[in-house]
Amino acid sequence: MRGIAISTVRQLWLAALLVPLTALAADPFRFVVTGDRTGFAQPGVYERVLQEVAAEKPAFVLSAGDTIEGLRDGTAAKEWAEWQALVSPYKQIPVYLAAGNHDIWSPFSESLFRRFAGHPLHYSFDFGPAHFTILDNSRGDTLSAGELAFLEDDLKAHAAQPLKFVMAHRPSWALDVMMGSTQFAGHVLAKKYGVRYVMAGHIHELLHASLDGVEYISLPSAGGDLRATRKYEDGWFFGYTVVDVTDKGVTFGIRELHAPYGQGRATKLDAWGKAGLLR
């Protein structure tokens, strides 16, 4: 239990779940979450994502990673510079990046990520009543012991924050969540410290599942190639997610890009399930 009593943990978790809604957003705010830009990036899509996201006027953008195509040391710096040029017209909107497998694959690529992202591989920050923990699983499908230790230490240190989000590039939780397992390490920590939302990219497909009051979200593509059926109803589309935090709670708005990259459909998160759009 890493030095904290079970009764204390239970009290912290219950306090996080029972906090009055007014405490969540004395000052309402909006942020946007984006999925992968790359992984066989499709021309023009990310540029449209940036345009439509800016129109939402978010306080900041949280990205699930795969920001460059990467995988080669020789071209990585140029690719990061190209990404920097794309986002420079929107520099008034802070962007917080998770590290994806297309971003980090070597010591040199790690140094570039730190330089261009402007933060460590794992880190956290607060915005109003919300706490955001960003983890690094760029080089493995699971969360390492070190990442789990960072997650627990970070959540423990910010236990007083009533609203908690966790992001990592790979959905290391996917199989366990889809099978309804509640025993995997990441979920045990999420439940223990009152995490409400766990998000990831990597697979380019929108999926959603609830487990013990924790919402698990696989984000749609922000430019990376669509796979499998390529059907909207199966979660294969280009888009982004708008999150509003108000005194009424937290709402996730799923936005599909407008033509020519989509039909501009807008849904709520609870319209989606483990296999795509609920029918």
Image (cartoon, helix red, strand yellow):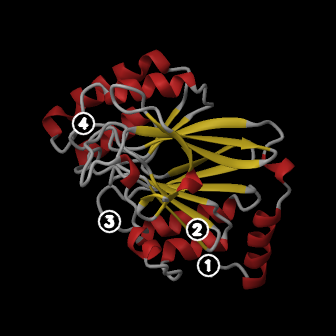
> Label 2: which residue?
152
| Residue at position x 24%, y 33% in the image | 42
Q: Label 1: state its secondary structure.
A: loop
Badge 2 or badge 4: first in the primary sequence:
4
Q: Are discs 4 and 1 less than 8 Å apart at CB?
A: no
Q: Which image quarter holds the N terminus?
A: bottom right
Badge 1 or badge 2: first in the primary sequence:
1
Q: Label 2: state its secondary structure.
A: helix
Mark seen at residue 67: none
Q: Is residue 153 above or below residue 120?
A: below
- Neighbourhood count class around disc 3 (C-alpha, 10 Å): few under 14, some 14–19, many 20 upward: few
- Neighbourhood count class around disc 2 (C-alpha, 10 Å): few under 14, some 14–19, many 20 upward: some
Q: Looking at numbered disc 3 in the image, what kind of residue is underneath it? A: Asp
> Label 4: which residue?
41
Cα separation, mark 4 vs mark 1, equals 42 Å
Q: Looking at numbered disc 4 in the image, what kind of residue is underneath it? A: Ala
Query: Image quadrant of residue 86?
Result: top left
- Horizontal relation, residue 124 to residue 221: left or right: right
Cα separation, mark 4 vs mark 3, equals 21 Å
Q: Nearer the viewer, residue 51 or 190?
A: 51
> Label 1: which residue?
2
Picture coordinates of residue 240, whole percent (x, y): 47, 39
Q: Label 4: state its secondary structure.
A: loop
Badge 4 or badge 1: first in the primary sequence:
1
Q: Are discs 1 and 2 less than 8 Å apart at CB?
A: yes
Picture coordinates of residue 100, whole percent (x, y): 33, 49
- Neighbourhood count class around disc 4 (C-alpha, 10 Å): few under 14, some 14–19, many 20 upward: many
